[in-house]
């Protein structure tokens, strides 16, 4: 059985030799659905490594079962929101080709924020393509095709491989599940192929991983008392949004955990922070737990500081003793 991969548990940026049996040109499929196209890519590109990115865990299961059953060692799937994976897992100029088939089937104006194909994603895709690398996009929605044409043709780092904005068929291409559904419902396909040209591109900034944060504090209160005083809070500073949603105590061990959501420009993390006693009487440490696979970004440092400083503010006899917090 393949070990399930998640964007929070792999290297940033990812190291091919840890996922595959070798380093090879990398092809990435975003939103692979039932995994048939991913498997097709792996079988028709034996000299390449194929990486699938998906947010649906059901799709992950389907694709992994197919990869496993066929014994393909050049294909792997990672459970990830594509935008996060593009920023954190893929280094600039490392991808030979991207394939995106029928993203956003609920294309409507009001879904603009959740839409995959938008300026920020196209800039990331362009930044991650190796020189001469290709971006393949398919959609069966005419309005979506028009929107994609405007975006792609307006990207200086990309050149259209076709003489027309899109083509209606590509010889030798297999049909995906959504494509077949589109034909059945009377829609037609629109295929795009753009190539990374030699124009210079800006690589969008990415939130960096830092060392592990912690905060030591002194308090006469026990963990149960601290949690009794807890109220959910939200704070926003320096482009980081921190929500401390819940707190739970384990009085028998004098520990507590805090459920936090930390949103930063290229990543959102939903994790638990812990408050636990140190050997020195009346002292506690606040740090990340393994729950949620927290990555120690700037925002996570600020979340540890927010929880620790809140606990230290609860009583006159409380104070922060030491902070290993960046920023
Ligand atoms: C309409 S389906 C298309 C599936 C397949 N490509 C096909 O053509 O049959 C869109 C797929 O993209 C996935 N998806 C949507 N947004 C995504 C995102 N931001 N990152 C990764 N996958 C995403 C969905 O889970 C779904 O499997």
Image (cartoon, helix red, strand yellow):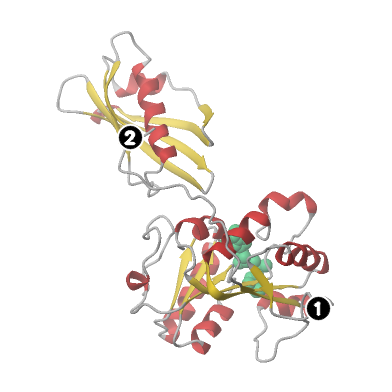
The single residue placed furthest to the bottom in the displayed view is 172
Residue at 63% from the left image edge and 54% from the top image edge: 120
Pick the front one: 262 or 89: 89
Mark 1 touching mark 2, by CB under 8 A? no
Mark 1 neighbour density, 10 Å: few (under 14) some (14–19) many (20 or more): some
Q: CA–CA distance between discs 1 and 2?
A: 53 Å
Residue 93 drawn at (x, y percent): 49, 67
Q: Residue 74 carries which label?
A: none
Q: Left or right? Give the position of 221 relative to 114.
A: left
**Which residue bears the numbered disc 1?**
188
Residue nearest the observer in this picture, 300 or 177: 300
- Residue 285 x, y percent position in the rendering: 26, 29
Does residue 112 appear left or right of residue 212 in this picture? right
Of callouts 1 and 2, which one flags the residue occurring earlier in the amino acid sequence?
1
Give me the residue at 40% from left, 66% from top: 4
Identify the image quadrant of the C terminus.
top left
Where does residue 48 sit, x and y in percent of width and height? 45, 82
Q: Quadrant of residue 20?
A: bottom left
Residue 274 got which mark?
A: 2
Q: Which of the 4 image quarters holds residue 199?
A: bottom right
Whether 127 is drawn above or below 303: the answer is below
């Amino acid at each position: 059985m393949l070990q399930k991969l998640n964007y929070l548990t792999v290297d940033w940026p990812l190291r091919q030799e840890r996922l595959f049996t070798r380093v090879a040109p990398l092809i990435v499929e975003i939103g692979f659905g039932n995994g048939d196209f991913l498997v097709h890519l792996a079988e028709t590109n034996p000299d390449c490594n194929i990486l699938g990115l998906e947010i649906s865990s059901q799709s992950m299961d389907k694709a992994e079962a197919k990869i496993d059953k066929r014994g393909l060692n050049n294909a792997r799937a990672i459970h990830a929101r594509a935008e996060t994976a593009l920023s954190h897992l893929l280094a600039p100029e490392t991808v030979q080709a991207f394939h995106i088939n029928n993203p956003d089937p609920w294309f409507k104006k009001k879904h603009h924020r959740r839409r995959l194909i938008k300026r920020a994603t196209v800039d990331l895709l362009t930044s991650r393509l190796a020189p001469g690398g290709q971006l393949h996009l398919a959609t069966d929605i005419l309005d979506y095709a028009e929107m994609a044409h405007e975006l792609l043709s307006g990207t200086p780092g990309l050149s259209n491989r076709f003489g027309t904005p899109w083509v209606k068929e590509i010889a030798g291409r297999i049909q995906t599940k959504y494509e077949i559904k589109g034909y059945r419902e009377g829609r037609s396909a629109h295929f795009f192929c753009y190539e990374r040209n030699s124009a210079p591109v800006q690589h969008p900034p990415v939130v960096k991983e830092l060392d592990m944060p912690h905060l030591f504090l002194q308090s006469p209160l026990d963990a149960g008392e601290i949690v009794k005083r807890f109220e959910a809070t939200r704070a926003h500073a320096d482009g980081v949004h921190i929500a401390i949603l819940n707190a739970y105590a384990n009085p028998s061990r004098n520990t507590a955990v805090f459920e936090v959501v930390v949103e930063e420009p290229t990543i959102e993390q939903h994790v638990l922070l812990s408050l636990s006693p140190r050997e020195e009487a009346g002292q506690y440490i606040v740090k990340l737990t393994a729950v949620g696979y927290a990555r120690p970004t700037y925002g996570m440092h600020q979340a540890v500081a927010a929880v620790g400083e809140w606990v230290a503010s609860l009583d006159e006899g409380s104070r922060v003793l030491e902070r290993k917090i960046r920023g």
